[in-house]
Amino acid sequence: MKKLSVEKIEHPGFLEFVCTGDHVPEDWEELVDLIYQECQRTGKNGVLVNGMSLSSVMDNMTRYRVGLLVAEKFGPSYKAAALMPREHINFFWETVAHNRGAKVRAASDRDTLVAWLSEQD
């Protein structure tokens, strides 16, 4: 099992975190903290988590915990987008975070998510 690997890319309008390998729930908690710190450091309020190369699917309990954490950390001040293979998306983390006031979106189309991140609120 290859541990989760994360590469940060700073785009003009948002930060991208490319995730590869396998993962455990703690990896996602650490990633949310890292993303929050990088948003604070750069002043950017848009984030794209690119999980197209993940080797396993996130379980529903982890999705729930990540949704709670994203809502707690980011609230309505940030936009968080998750780019995942279509078969990995069930919208559960998105629903959990959204119901708690966070601006989040999951999709398998990068262009759709980048356009959403670029929209003015």
Image: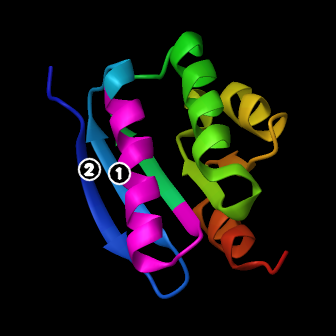
Q: Quadrant of residue 20?
A: top left
Between 4 and 44, the one lying in front of the other is 44
Kindly identify the amino acid type of the residue bearing the numbered disc 1. Answer: Leu
Q: Residue tagged by mark 1?
A: 34
Q: Secondary structure at mark 1?
A: helix
Q: Where in the figure is residue 102, as x and y percent of width and height?
A: 75, 47
Residue lying at 70% horizontally and 74% vertically, measured from the top left:
115
Quarter of the image with the N terminus in it:
top left
The image's mark for residue 6 is 2
Q: Residue at x 59, y 70 (%)?
A: 45
In the image, residue 82 sits, relative to residue 61, either above or below, namely: below
Drawn side of residue 20 relative to residue 37, left or right: left
| Circle nearer the N terminus (2, 1) | 2
* Magenta stretch prevailing secondary structure: helix
Work out whether 75 lies above or below 64.
Answer: below
* Residue 113, magenta (yes or no): no
**Of discs 2 and 1, which sits in the foreground?**
1
Q: Is residue 41 visible?
A: yes
- Answer whether labels 2 and 1 touch (C-beta < 8 Å): yes
